[in-house]
Structure formats: structure tokens, C-alpha cells
Image: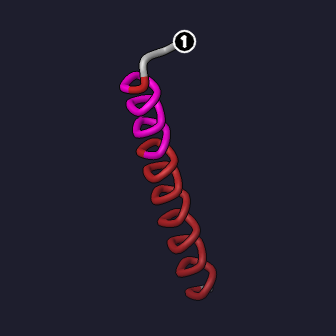
Amino acid sequence: MLPGGVILVFVLVGLAAIAVIGTVTYKKMQARKKGLQKF
């Protein structure tokens, strides 16, 4: 069994990664929408 602290670190790192990926994807989607509106 892993110590609770190790699991907590893994969870926090995972959430941080998901947040970063989500933000990047959202910005790309917004930029794409703005680009489509110009044409």
C-alpha cells in the first residue's frame, strides 16, 4: 500500500495537468471561433 501523502500528490498533479490541458484546449477553441468569425 502506498502512503496517503503519495496518493494525494498524484491526485494533485493529475488535477493540475487536467486544468492546464483544459485551459490550453479552451483557448485554442476560442481562437478558432474568433478566426471563423473574421472570414
Q: Residue at x 46, y 42 (%)?
A: 17
- Give neighbour class at mark 1: few <14, some 14-19, many 20+ (Cα, 10 Å): few
Residue in the picture at 47% in, 45% down? 15
Over which residues does the magenta segment extend?
5-15
Q: In terms of depth relative to the viewer, which is nearer, 3 or 9?
A: 3
Q: Where's the N terminus, which quadrant?
A: top right
Q: Residue at x 55, y 58 (%)?
A: 25
Q: How many numbered markers are drawn?
A: 1
As rendered, which of 12 and 4 lies closer to the eye?
4
Report whether 37 appears left or right of 8: right
Determine the image quadrant of residue 6.
Answer: top left
Q: Position of residue 3 (x, y in %)?
A: 42, 18
Q: Is residue 39 left or right of residue 13?
A: right
Relative to 32, residue 20 above or below: above
Is 14 one of the magenta-colored residues? Answer: yes
Which residue occupies 36% across, 26% down? 5
Looking at numbered disc 1 in the image, what kind of residue is underneath it?
A: Met
Helix, strand or loop at mark 1: loop
- Residue 12 rendering spot, x and y as whole percentages: 41, 40
Measured along the vertical axis of the image, is residue 32 above or below residue 11?
below
Image x and y of residue 22, in percent? 52, 56
Foreground residue among 32 and 20: 20
The x, y position of residue 27, in whole percent, is 47, 66
Front in this rendered view, residue 5 or 38: 5
- Decide whether the magenta segment is chiefly helix, strand or loop: helix
Using residue 24 as the reference point, say whether residue 36 is left or right of it.
right
Q: Which residue is mark 1?
A: 1
